Image (tube, grey):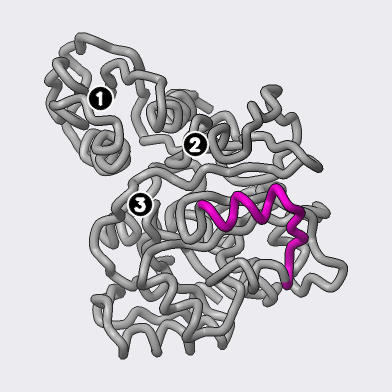
Amino acid sequence: MSGSNDHIDGNARRYGKQAIVAAAERLQSGGLVAVPTETVYGLAADSTNASAIADIYRTKGRPDFNPLIVHVPDIDTARKIGMFNDLAATLAKKFWPGPLTLVVPKTSDCPVTPAVTAGLDTIALRCPAHPLMQELLEASGLFLAAPSANKSGEISPTTAEHVERSLGSAAPLILDGGRCETGVESTIVAIRDNDYQILRPGPITKEDLQRITGKLGIAEQSSTIEAPGQLMSHYAPSKPVRINAKQSESDEYHIGFGDTEGDKNLSASGDLAEAATNLFAALHIADAATQAQIAVAPIPKSGIGAAINDRLKRASQQE
């Protein structure tokens, strides 16, 4: 349906009641809407509508074995499509609404179309904190599948302009809620009976999870694609990326951190949360710069630094 997703107000609408109503109606009729969350902009569709979900995959050029995250307004709604044991419920009550995605078994009567879960018996669920996304969930009354609103494998979008630049003429109605606050995608945690496994690091750190659960979690890497962000090459600019670079070459745009100034500094004070917020925006700027390559300064791996390094490692993998 991307061809029938006509552009409204130059493709992007500022956040407001009228825009929410128009977006909800579009989703209910099987269309796509790009909407901000506290992490990145998502490309939303009704998760129970097979045609709408197929349109997400077409618009993004996303491989069909890569599952989508379904967004819900609260844990009570989440329980209609996913099964929550005590551990899952504890994590949801602590971190929702917020940047945590939980991978749990589907309910027996889960109405979500199989393409959303790539045919798996599990479903990835998140309750987002952004007020615009929450209003859209309420107004539409839908379970919204919403991967990042960009071409598959490219730099994730943290502004409406990033969405339009990546998707181009395929971009649907974009709800412009300004810049995303957190700046990297949600932490994804798979519930393994009474234990858990981090599938993708994010703003909710391993230390946060250990503190709440009293468990270290399962350390092994998952060999099955159960959730977004597990592909080796992901979040990638069009140029080669070199990481852990304290100095840059003449043909490199240098993204700095802390005392390593660079052409663009993620956080001059060495604040990892600030660096996460600025990461994708800096990669977009570097990708548009005249230099042929990108170099990124070393980033500490503690706390949310684990998520930053995960994104940079995948961005530096060349197909």
Q: Residues within 10 Å of mark 3 (few under 14, many from 20)?
A: many
Asked if one can make out residue 77 in the rendered structure from this viewpoint, the answer is yes
Circle 2/circle 3 CB separation < 8 Å: no
Circle 1/circle 3 CB separation < 8 Å: no
Identify the residue at image location x=43%, y=54%: 150
Identify the residue at image location x=47%, y=28%: 310
In the depicted structure, whether residue 5 falls above or below residue 255: below
Judging by the rendered image, the residue that carries numbered circle 1 is: 292
Magenta region, residue range: 80-94
| Residue 3 part of the magenta-drawn span | no
Amino acid marked by disc 1: Ala
Q: Earlier in the sequence, mark 2 or mark 3?
A: 3
Disc 1 is placed on an element classified as: loop
The picture quadrant where one finds residue 268 is top left
Q: Residues within 10 Å of mark 2 (few under 14, many from 20)?
A: few
In the depicted structure, whether residue 174 falls above or below residue 146: below
Question: Which marked residue is nearer to the observer: mark 2 or mark 1?
Answer: 2
Question: What is the CA distance from the residue labelled 2 to the residue labelled 3?
Answer: 26 Å
Of the pair 140 and 113, the residue shown nearer to us: 140
Question: Which marked residue is nearer to the observer: mark 2 or mark 3?
Answer: 2
| Residue 83 part of the magenta-drawn span | yes
Judging by the rendered image, the residue that carries numbered circle 3 is: 157
In the depicted structure, whether residue 248 falls above or below residue 100: above
Amino acid marked by disc 2: Asp
